[in-house]
Image (cartoon, rainbow, N blue to C red):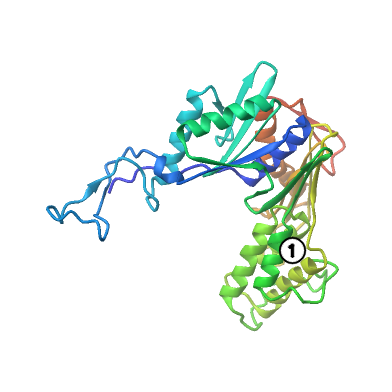
Amino acid sequence: MDYEEVFAPVARLEAIRIFLAYASYMNFTVYQMDVKTTFLYGKVKEEIYVCQPPGFEDSQYPDHVYKLDKALYGLHQAPRAWYATLTDHLLANGYTRGAIDQTLFVRKDKDDLILVQIYVDDIIFGSTSSALCKEFEGVMKKKFEMSAMGEMTFFLGLQVKQDPKGVLIHQGKYVTDILTKFKMLESKPASTPMAARPVLTSDSDGEDVDQHLYRSMIGSLMYLTDSRPDIMFSVCQCARYQANPKASHLIAVKRICRYLVGKPRLDLWYPKNSEFRLHAYSDSDFGGCNLDRKSTTGGCQYLGDRLVSWQCKKQTTVSTYIAEAEYVAASSCCSQPPYRLSRIQYNTPKLNILISGFTSSVTVSNGN
């Protein structure tokens, strides 16, 4: 009954994009490994008992229960126990854990560096030295049963192509899958993801639609925004009406799908010959929401020419003048993961923040 803490950290997709951006900057290849029967390696600290599995009861003690020494699939503690076991193993072999992103592990050997990013049982890694990559594979196979998958090509729904000029990221297969799922693959393409007029409202007098279908479409499109900043604003607008969707909202969501029919792929390109300096741009409207007059913040962050993060979110407070909305947007822009991760994790040069609408640049020091 004593579950204690069951949380286990997982890598954010912004961290994955920053990892790939850094790999392109340092000109090394990213590889992928998979751990077999992951959760069975974790050791539990709590006192946990389970019933005897059907068909495997002890005939002499049919009413007894088993006390667990290791985690099982379905156990609440399993993800945390696995991460703790993996962390202890890597730390014992000379790796250091990231201070900000605790799913990132780093090891330096003279002038060479190896980076390891963990997402439960999926592991990506890359190094400036091929010897360090081979050594890491040996370290992992020493304790866990692993399957080496070669160069990273598909990770968390992202399709990745690495070549001598840079790294290409897209979700083309996922777009085809969701259009097929919602029977929109043969629809007439739209030139833009959302119409400028009429503005989307709550439409309280509109016709009700299937909430399950609407929320399923929104959820699928939200995951697609991990590589498609062009639909970020439209999807966030439609996501506001999931509680009581109307026909007008469903038409807006279907327009996004029709836009994807015409543009099924939008690639993120991380060139190898670009600098690794962090630039950020932010903007906001003023009182753009018709319901509560709150402003909407938009922002994006680049590492050189590599787009690694973007946002579109309604502000939590009502701004009384335009400059206030802009400052709130700038503050939100500067609190995004690239600021916390880039300098501390990857020891980048000073970060010059170029904020849209401001004439001066701000130098960030000490990662704050």
Expressed as whole percent of the image width and height from the top left, the position of residue 46 reads 30, 40
Expressed as whole percent of the image width and height from the top left, the position of residue 224 reads 69, 58
- Kindly identify which residue carries mark 1: 234
Q: Residues within 10 Å of mark 1 (few under 14, many from 20)?
A: many
Using the image as rendered, state which of residue 252 and residue 16 is in the foreground: 16
Residue 19 occupies which quadrant of the picture? top right
Using the image as rendered, state which of residue 93 and residue 269 is in the foreground: 93
Q: Is residue 106 above or below residue 1?
A: above
Residue drawn at 50 percent across, 26 percent down:
91
Q: Is 139 placed left or right of 264 in the picture?
A: left
Residue drawn at 62 percent across, 51 percent down:
156
Q: Amino acid at mark 1?
A: Ser
Using the image as rendered, state which of residue 55 and residue 118 is in the foreground: 55
Using the image as rendered, state which of residue 319 and residue 21 is in the foreground: 21
Residue drawn at 69 percent across, 35 percent down:
339
Q: Residue furthest top?
A: 110
Expressed as whole percent of the image width and height from the top left, the position of residue 229 reads 76, 54
Circle 1 SS class: helix
